[in-house]
Image (tube, rainbow, N blue to C red):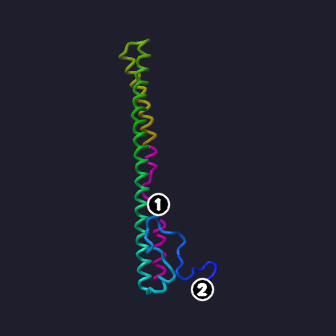
Amino acid sequence: MTTGPGYPGPGEYLGTDRPASGSSAAEYTTAADVEDQSVGSLLGRVTSDLSTLMRQEVELAKVEIKEEATKAGKASGMLAGAGAVGYLVLVFLALALMFALDQVMPIGWAALITAVVLGIIAAVLFVLGRKRFRQVNPKPEQTVETLKEDVQWAKNRTS
């Protein structure tokens, strides 16, 4: 067995980090412990350690995703609140326009003019939205093209 700088001596700890506080001394791996074990048991320990590590990583990912989902939920709630308040602002602006026009004409005509203005705005937004919606292509063109290339490549390799 080699000893010296960078190599553990008999009975010395092999790991770079000590186990978490509260861990038993049995969790420390020493050179003597490794020498006395079979390759099968060492592989079993490594497999067990990797399995534990993967479970811990999955749990960490779950916690992080839950935290991010909570943040996203709160942000969505705030945006929904902003949308509702924005809608009320639009209603009150329409009422303000109507009452302003009421100062120079009957309220019925003021309400009708306000409704026509809002209708024109809605129609313009509808036409623009429909135009953009027609430009949306739900088919992933690049992916379809690369899949066709992959199929062609596979056919050429097998023939």
Residue flagged by tag 2: what amino acid is it? Thr
Residue at the far left in the pictured view:
108
Q: Residue at x 46, y 77 (%)?
A: 154
Q: Looking at the image, which is closer to me, 11 or 131?
A: 11
Q: Which residue is mark 1?
A: 141
Q: Residue at x 41, y 32 (%)?
A: 85
Element under disc 1:
helix
Q: Looking at the image, which is closer to me, 59 or 137?
A: 59
Count of numbered badges drawn on the protein = 2
Q: Which of the image's four quarters has the N terminus?
A: bottom right
The stretch in magenta equals 131-159
Q: Residue at x 55, y 71 (%)?
A: 16
Q: Which residue is mark 2?
A: 2
Q: Is residue 124 above or below residue 76?
A: above
Q: Is residue 63 above or below residue 99?
A: below
Disc 2 to disc 1, how far (Cα)? 61 Å
Q: Residue at x 45, y 73 (%)?
A: 25
Q: Please provide percent x and percent y for residue 118.
A: 41, 28
Label 2 crowd (10 A; few <14 / some 14-19 / many >=20): few
Residue flagged by tag 1: what amino acid is it? Glu
Q: Is residue 101 shown in magenta?
A: no
